[in-house]
Image: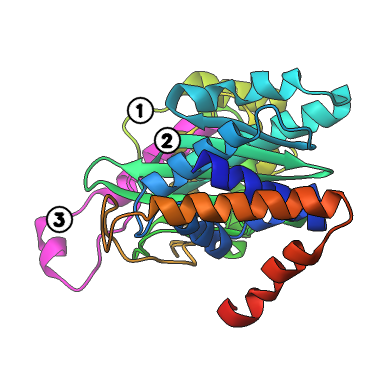
Amino acid sequence: MVKLGREIMKVIVFEYGEEEFVKRIADPFWFQSLSCVLGFDWHSSGTTTVTLGALKEGLKGEEIDLHILGGKGKAMRRTITEIDSFDAGSQEKDALKYASRMCAKIDTSAIQSGHGIYHHSMVIGGKDWAVVQQGMRPADGTARRYHWLGSEVEKFTIEPHKGIVGNKEKKILNMVARESEDAQRISVDVANEGLAKLRGAIVEVKDIYQRRLDDFFSDQKVRYLLMPRNLNWEGVRKAYEFQPRDYEALLSVKGVGPSTVRALALITELVYGARPSYEDPVRYSFAVGGKDGVPFPVDRKAMDESTEMLKEAVENAKLGKEDKLKAVKRLELFVG
């Protein structure tokens, strides 16, 4: 997987440049296709972690302006440190660090489906970046993968994703949907008014939630969003002192996490009538299956032959002999 992945990256960079590879990684369909080419004959959560791990390993020692940072578990927490390690100006590094943190914060806090992020990779090439991260829901073992492309993020808090892969669900809290803009604005207003105002609003919401037993046998629906039992009041205090100008700035405050976002969303709906979106932003779904021989074992010989063919095509192209590389490109006519 490492060898074949390396040659595929080199072909794309040679033909189209580093930014094109970043753009393709951010495409959920292309990423899934690549993982299958590298040996995943079926779809599972492992396609994300192993594919990106193999590509990261394949870049070692290669002299191309392409970087894959982060990874699974403890490795994802090293993304910021790894940004510091490569050659770039301080402003560019700060912008990349901010993007990495905001992607993680939004997919953890602003979109609440119960999938905790355990994999975060940032791919940087030329002047563009992509983030691919994955969350797992312990209750049922389902996963969803989030794709971002820097050049297409106009605003981190309004429909920012290139795509999200997973099983589409009926109701989740989606505070980065366009329909949630009013709820975003009021959430910022409430946070800026301080702890006393927020505590009063929580008491008011709890009063609204008082129900009779008869309500559960009527046609009245019990609301989806529940007030969290515990809030990070230190995070709320920091937000008040910071006085965020908009929802993105509010999310950027350390300590403003899922429970604070949920509490503010509930207050905006029940007290101020600004309903957030509960539409699942998943846009691409794949069948659930396993790897390791399903539907058939990986043909390692064919993988090795493909790797050598690509490697030789790139080396010859560098020497001005582009016949083999053009032949590879012509295969698209048969498989496209």
Q: Gap between marks 3 and 1, in whole Å?
A: 25 Å
Q: Is residue 225 visible?
A: yes
Residue found at the very far bottom of the displayed protein: 334
**Considering only order in the chain, which callout, 1 or 3, is on the residue closer to the N terminus?**
3
Please give left or right for residue 30 compared with residue 99 in the image: left
Is residue 128 highlighted in magenta?
no
Establish if 71 lies above or below 266: above
Identify which residue is drawn at 49% across, 32% down.
257
Mark 3 nearby-residue class (10 Å; few <14, some 14–19, many ≥20): few
Residue 306 place in picture, x, y as percent: 55, 56
Mark 2 nearby-residue class (10 Å; few <14, some 14–19, many ≥20): some
Q: Amino acid at mark 3?
A: Arg
Mark 2 near mark 1, Cβ–Cβ under 8 Å? Answer: yes
Question: Foreground mark, 3 or 2?
Answer: 2
The front one of 332 and 89 is 332
Mark 3 near mark 2, Cβ–Cβ under 8 Å? Answer: no
Q: Is residue 273 visible?
A: no
Q: Gap between marks 2 and 1, in whole Å?
A: 7 Å
The residue identified by callout 3 is 212
Query: What span is in magenta?
Result: 197-226
Q: Gap between marks 3 and 2, in whole Å?
A: 26 Å
The residue identified by callout 2 is 259
Q: Amino acid at mark 2?
A: Ser
The residue identified by callout 1 is 230
**Considering only order in the chain, which callout, 1 or 2, is on the residue closer to the N terminus?**
1
The front one of 239 and 81 is 81
